[in-house]
Image (spheres, grey):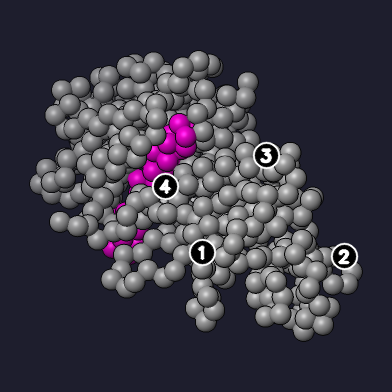
Amino acid sequence: MSTPVPTLPTTLPAVEVAASARAGHARVVLSRAAPEGPPLLGPGGDDLTADWVGDVALTGSAGEVRAAPAASAADWVLGVGGGTPADYRAAGVALVRAVEADRDGDGPGRGLALALPPDAGPDEAAQLARGLALGGYRFTVTAEERPARLRTARLVVPDAEQRALVAAAVHRSVVLASATAFARDLANTPSNVKDPAWLARTAARAAGRVPGLTATVHDERWLTANGFGGVLAVGGGSTRPPRLLHLTWSPPGATGPHLGLIGKGITFDTGGISIKPADGMHLMRTDMSGGAAVIAATLAVARLELPVRVSALVPCAENHVSGSAYRPGDVVRHHGGKTSEISNTDAEGRIVLADALVHAVDTLGVDVLVDVATLTGAMKVALGLRTGGLFASEDALAERVRAAGERAGEAWWRMPLLDEFADAVVSDLADVRQGPPGPGGITAALFLREFTAGLPWAHLDIAGPARADKHYDDVSPGGTGFAARTLVEFVASYAAE
């Protein structure tokens, strides 16, 4: 039986770099804002008259899109503002949205050709490519015919040396954009389709198409035999049993530490017996956004052939309500033997992550741990909807993640791991308690720290930026794919050493 979702992954426009335009592609002229007077027109804009520029009030501001006059060889004029990389990204986003919305014209047609000015280097081209790739992203489940989509955007760079540099930057940018889009796809898939088995299977199939990347999916029988009490407890209330996804990237000649990436894979979260309010519960299809980021990032690491060993784990479970659901007051025995006293079944993410953290340390032998999760509403309150919370056991690791986020265009704010609350994690009934009193984001991180065996560890809480309710930058409403690019840049930082 077919599933009511689009084919995954979503097809993004191909962004290519060449010495000349391709026949049949719509021509795009870039315009740059000038301190005074009319904007500066890039290659191909010689036949755009001053009268036309004045008539349409062309400014060259970033993201300004105008249909060129019929007499011109160009089809579109696109503003790139002051020419910064961010301006080029905004321009790419605006262009693809305008072209795909052009129902009265020819629509996207076969593709676009954009002649880059000589001062547009690899950074500008990479951001333009990201905007073109992600600006038109949308995930809809509908019986309506899908509207025409842009298929190809060609960046024209005549100089051979410059073209090689631009092509390398664009390739990398498109791989990162594809990771973001796939993470969005996984998060946006409705949970009547996306159960734990579907998530693990879909990720494994995608991994199977990437040379050198291997995937293993462990079912509930394996989880039981190996004592994954946290994952089994959280998934016990659902008729759709849990899974553990394990992706392995171990390229020949890998150097540096063995990195462990762990992502929360709760495919739907009712809150369990500590049930959530009805308002907003439909958004819990995106509660596996941390797992989606880890999956997509690991695929991108392999596609980029980064010479760093990575083990990625995504514990997948559905937190449901039934007679077999775990209860407040239960004691859960985790993989490795440590026990947790349950105080709130809606704090399930940390329970599944604990099992995976121990497995990464004890069985896989990782050297550095990073976990990613839509973990606490406290982070959403503290940092809003566009900044991730960063906790880390070491300053150097925190800075490495922050810098990776800066390169990826994702904002992180370091939060304190306050030891004054560490005693609150200790339980009178079990080894630790799941929901200690105190500031929620911090105490959740302190709970997870108990399962890291003292290794360098970072915890990324993406409860705020994992979802969007409106367009901004190259983000569309729904799952954002936040953290996927940061993780790729984080792994790449070790390859550069």
The residue carrying mark 4 is: 183
Residue 35 — which label?
Answer: 2
Q: Earlier in the sequence, mark 1 or mark 2?
A: 2
Indicate the secondary structure of the residue bearing disc 1. Answer: loop
Residue name at image x 20 percent, y 49 percent: 320
Mark with earlier residue (3, 4): 3
In this picture, which residue range is highlighted in magenta? 275-303
User: Nearer the observer, disc 4 or disc 1?
Assistant: 1
Residue type at the position of mark 4: Ala
Q: Which of 337 and 53 is in front in this view?
A: 53
Hey, what amino acid is under mark 1? Arg
Mark number for residue 164?
A: 3
How far apart, in angstroms, are the residues tagged by discs 4 and 1? Answer: 27 Å
The residue depicted at 57 percent of the width and 65 percent of the height is: 24
Q: Name the amino acid type tagged 3.
A: Ala
Q: What residue type is labelled 2?
A: Pro
For residue 428, side relative to residue 481 (left or right): left
Report the Cα–Cα distance between label 2 and label 3. Answer: 32 Å
429 sits left or right of 387 in the view: left
N-terminal of the pair, mark 4 or mark 1, is 1
Q: Residue at x 36, y 55 (%)?
A: 188
Image location (x, y in percent) of residue 124 = 70, 49
- Left of 82 or right of it: where is 195? left
Front disc: 1 or 2:
1
Q: Which of marks 3 and 4 is in front?
A: 3
**Tag 4, which secondary structure?**
helix
User: Residue 107: image x %, image y %?
Assistant: 51, 73
Question: Looking at the image, can residue 477 be seen?
Answer: no
Disc 3, SS: helix
Residue linked to disc 1: 110
Q: Classify mark 2: helix, strand or loop.
A: loop
